[in-house]
Every structure is written in C-alpha cells, then in structure tokens.
Image (cartoon, rainbow, N blue to C red):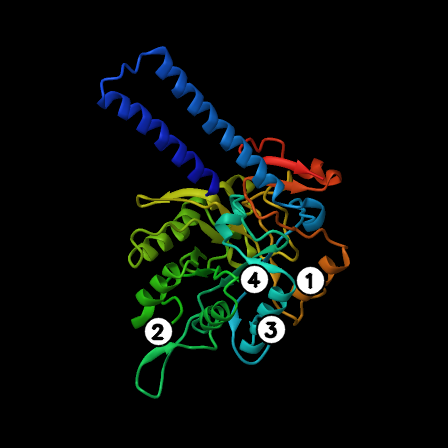
Amino acid sequence: MKKQMIIFLALILVFLIVGCGADVGVNTDDPVVEEQQDTLEGEVEEIAEADEEIIIEEINLLEIKPNEAGEIMVLMYHHIREPEAEWSRTPDNFRKDLMELYYRGYRPISLYDYATGNINTEAGMTPVILTFDDGNQNNFNMIENDDGEWIIDPDSAVGILVDFHKIYPDFPLEATFFINGGTPFGQKEFIEYKLNYIVEKGMDIGNHTMTHINFTNTTPEKIQEEIGKLNKFIRQYLPDYEVNTLALPFGSKPSNQEWHSYLVEGEYEGEKYHNVAVLEVGWDPYHSPYSSNFNASKIRRVRASETKVDGVGIYDWLKAFDQGTRLRYISDGDSNYISVPEKYKDRIMQNLDIKTIRTY
C-alpha cells in the first residue's frame, strides 16, 4: 500500500507538469520537457524499487524464522454437541481447541487461499484450516430466546466461532462448511438465512455431494450429478456464489483412477464445476502449497478429536510440531514471497514464477 501511494503521487506530479505545460502552450515535444518527464518517471521507478527493498528488509528472517516449506493442518470436524464421541466435539472442547490454536500461534485461513497458495498469515504464525462436514444442525443452530427472538445458538459451531472472533479479532473468522442436499443445518425455514450468513461473514460453503454418496463404485455420470446437482441446489440460495471445494464423503474415490478427474472438474445439466481443493478424510498435516509434493486434489485432513484417533488427532500433531518431529509451516506474512531456511529450499516447487523465494 505504501509503495502504491508513492507511485500514485509521483505519477500525479508527472501528469500535472505535462498537463500544465499543455494549458499554457508549451510544446510537449520539446526535448527539455521530454527530459523532465523521463527524469520524473525514472525517479518513480527508483522510489518503487527502493520501497520494495524496504518491504523485504522489514522482516527479520533470523528473528521470525519463517519456514514456508512446513506442513499445515486441515482440521476436520463433524458434530459440535454433547457428549464427546468419535465424531462429536462438545462445545466446551471446541472452544478449548480454538484457545489452544490461538495461544500456540495458529491462525485460520480459507481453504481456497491454502489451495491456491495465497497465504498472508501474520509473520511468525502458522495457518490452519477449519472444516466441518455434513451440515449438521449443531454446526449452525437457531434458538428462540426469552424475548421470542431467533438468535444463533452460542453452543453451535458458528456461534462459537463468531464469539471467539469477537474476543480475539486477530483470529480470523475463516471456516468451510461442507454440506449435502436436503436441509443443510436442519431447520428448513432458516436455510437461506444460514447460507447467506456464512458467506457474508467471510466463511465458505463447500460441496459434500447431494446425497453423501460413496464414490467407490460410481460412474463418471453419477459423480458429476452428485457434485453438479448440489452446486445447483446451493445456487438457489446463493446465486452469485461459486462453490469450488469438495470434501469426499467417507473419503471415498472412484475405484477407476481414470475417473478421479471428475472430482475436480465436470458438468451436470449445464452446471459446470471446478474444485480448487478436494479433501480426503486423512490422518495427518498436509504439505505446504508451495511444496513440490502438494496436490490440491488429494489434501489430507486431521481429525479434530481426542477420541479413537489412534495417535493422529489434533493434539498429537500439535505435540509433534512443538517437538519438531514434524515440520511446522511458519508464515513470513506476505504471499508474494516464499521464505525458507536454506536447507529446505529444495522442497519448494521450481515453477512458481509469480513468487519470490528467499532463504536465510
């Protein structure tokens, strides 16, 4: 922003000089005028280059120690309800998860930004992605208060996230809710309100197929129907919203690998879709989007639970990151750069022309 403002003001100065010269009858083809223009334009370029250098130097790499070759957790939730169970997190335990993430230096980003490598997480912090499957009512519930007004249930996932963000505004309100057809989030009379509320708050709606189908033995036609039909369903309520992420029901994929491409791209009754991210069920943190091993159509997730997780739940991986047995992604705060220790440079993709790689 600083650089853009400097360039903008300098260009205004150029235009004013040229414009004023034209008003008083000065010949703008005059070599003297041209020389003045060239000088000013050269100064604009020098200012821009100097400011670019300042921006780079603002980050003390040795102090912050960013490592954007590290791994990122895509957390998978289902129910937010009592009691605690394999696929259920209690409201208080969900709040505990958010608090742990916050104080350990994790900050939510959108799944889209992760998949497309647009990570602007605060320098020194670690991005994390929050996802919720199945569109359960306890993810977004409406209740009637004592005054007869309908309000968001403070113990639902959305209610907890919104309240937490109010208390900790530097913990971004980012999450993706993967829904099916029928009555997402229950309460049919509130479907439109809930979907619009999620999007208006900056969170996202993802595709979990129309009927929560198991893709293992499906055909290309059925795959496209399940994905495209749900997108059409969502468009009834969000006509201008693009659904571009898919969470695989049961983590299932077609047994015929040649049909996997339909999970990413296809068409149903004129409804074309393109998913920038396809999520598996998974069991561990996934690669940096800048890693040569990253594949946006095969993103693994972490079970956000402490029940029957077999050593691969959220707290197992938090511990692994803390102990250094898994490499944690540390942001440099600027998506234009990829900052890594020199010894991890080889892990970064070599065809990232729009990014600048810097090492220390």
Name which of mark 3 and mark 2 comes first in the sequence: 3
Judge whether residue 222 can be spotted in this image.
yes
The residue that label 1 is drawn on is 318
- Image position of 61 with respect to 86: above or below: above
Q: What residue type is labelled 1?
A: Leu
The residue most toward the bottom is 146
Instruction: Calculate the distance from the C-alpha at mark 1 to the C-alpha at mark 2.
Output: 36 Å
53 sits to left or right of 325: left
Judge the density around disc 3: few (<14), some (14-19), many (≥20) Cα neighbours within 10 Å. Answer: few
Q: How far apart are marks 3 and 2 (CA)?
A: 27 Å
Return the mark for residue 96: 3
Q: Which residue is found at the position 47% from the left and 69% from the top?
A: 166
Q: Of marks 4 and 3, which one's residue comes earlier in the chain?
A: 4
Residue behind mark 2: 187
* Tag 1–tag 3 contact (CB < 8 Å): no
- Spatial distance from mark 1 to mark 3, Cα to Cα? 13 Å
| Residue 132, numbered label | none
Q: Return the mark for residue 76.
A: 4
How dense is the environment of label 4, judged by Cα within 10 Å: few (below 14), some, or many (20 and up)? many
Q: Which of pointers 1 and 3 lies earlier in the amino acid sequence? A: 3
Question: Of the residues under marks 1 and 4, which one precedes in the sequence?
Answer: 4
Above or below residue 165? Residue 257 is: above
Circle 2 SS class: loop
**What residue do we see at 63% from left, 31% from top?**
350
The one nearer the camera, 150 or 82, is 150
